[in-house]
């Protein structure tokens, strides 16, 4: 009899363990991906000049924001710190996933704009310091783009249950693009144009859902969670970011095309020649 009780208790334990493990819920994530559209602008070809412009690669700077580390409590009183499971920084996401592609696209667009306006080009150079002295003597002006990005998120709603958290918010794309034209030997600035990205009013909504646990350890609660769990969780960050970057790129390139005016650039010719005569060794 005693042996039978031990066997029954053992079997009961195995059944309960199996039942509890069977109540664990793993919810797949549906990632909504976006598509980048970073085409160069279509510009009419103007007559060629004898002026050589040196192109420097766009340099990116970022404004960073502290992450919210506030804990949340579910309906059953379970304490959850969402930051321990998922942290989303728009600036870091951009730097890791989009910076190289956007840098290359801006570089190509600036080259296309200047070539279409009749200028010869040297470069691109990784930095201004990479331009050799001989190149500086031969080029008319150097073109130095700088991108200062202020991409921030505003959380409009954040809630958690026993299995997952949902964050809904808005991503704002701000900052500016500065394009500087300077005589490379003297570093005398002839043109400095600033494009305020906030004027474009680029705002994209997003939703992030992420699982924080597969079970609570309470059999009734876990069974209920399993029965009511959604088919999948949603993550629309990539789509929101790519949509915003497309709008930023189109706005910035159109402004760059407007500001890099052929006649204005050529109007500096006399002053540039005088500076180069003064800077002889």
Image: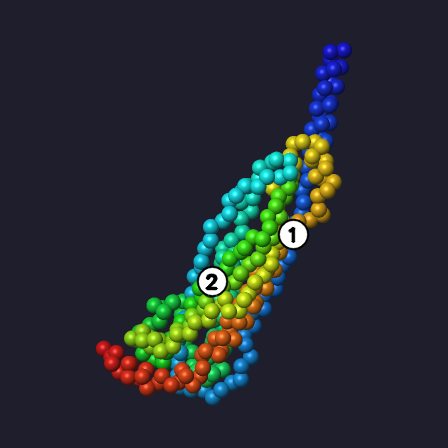
Q: In the rendered image, which quarter is residue 245 located in?
A: bottom right
Tell me the element at label 2.
Answer: strand
Q: Position of residue 104 (x, y in %)?
A: 49, 68
What residue lies at 47% left-to-right and 88% top-to-bottom?
47
Q: Position of residue 219 (x, y in %)?
A: 70, 31
Name the image quarter holding the N terminus: top right
Instruction: Say whether residue 126 is left or right of residue 7.
Output: left
Name the image quarter holding the C terminus: bottom left
Q: In the rendered image, which quarter is residue 127 located in?
A: bottom left
Instruction: Say whether residue 209 is left or right of residue 102.
Output: right
Instruction: Say whether residue 264 is left or right of residue 42.
Output: left
What residue lies at 29% left-to-right and 75% top-to-bottom?
186
Q: CA distance from mark 1 to mark 2?
A: 27 Å
Neighbour tally class for label 2: few under 14, some 14-19, many 20 plus, Cα within 10 Å? some
Q: Which mark is residue 234?
A: 1
Q: Nearer the viewer, residue 205 or 34?
A: 205
Please name the residue that numbered disc 2 is placed on. 149
Tell me the element at label 1.
Answer: strand
């Amino acid at each position: 009899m005693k042996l039978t009780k031990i066997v029954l208790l053992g079997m009961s334990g195995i059944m309960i363990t199996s039942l509890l493990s069977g109540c664990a819920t793993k919810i797949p994530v549906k990632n909504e991906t976006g598509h980048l559209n970073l085409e160069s602008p279509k510009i009419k070809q103007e007559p060629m000049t004898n002026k050589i412009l040196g192109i420097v690669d766009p340099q990116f700077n970022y404004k960073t924001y502290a992450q919210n580390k506030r804990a949340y409590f579910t309906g059953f009183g379970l304490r959850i710190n969402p930051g321990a499971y998922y942290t989303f920084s728009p600036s870091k996401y951009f730097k890791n996933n989009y910076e190289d592609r956007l840098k290359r696209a801006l570089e190509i667009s600036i080259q296309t704009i200047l070539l279409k306006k009749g200028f010869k080009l040297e470069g691109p150079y990784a930095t201004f310091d990479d331009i050799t002295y001989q190149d500086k003597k031969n080029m008319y002006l150097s073109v130095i783009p700088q991108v200062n990005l202020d991409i921030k998120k505003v959380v409009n709603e954040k809630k958690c249950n026993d299995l997952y958290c949902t964050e809904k918010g808005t991503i704002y794309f701000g900052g500016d693009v500065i394009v500087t034209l300077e005589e490379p030997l003297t570093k005398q600035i002839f043109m400095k144009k600033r494009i305020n990205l906030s004027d474009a009013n680029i705002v994209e909504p997003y939703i992030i859902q992420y699982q924080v646990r597969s079970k609570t350890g309470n059999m009734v609660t876990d069974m209920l969670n399993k029965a009511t769990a959604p088919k999948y969780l949603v993550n629309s960050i990539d789509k929101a970011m790519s949509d915003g970057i497309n709008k930023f790129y189109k706005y910035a390139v159109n402004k760059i095309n407007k500001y890099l005016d052929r006649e204005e650039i050529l109007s500096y010719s006399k002053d540039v020649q005088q500076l180069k005569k003064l800077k002889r060794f």
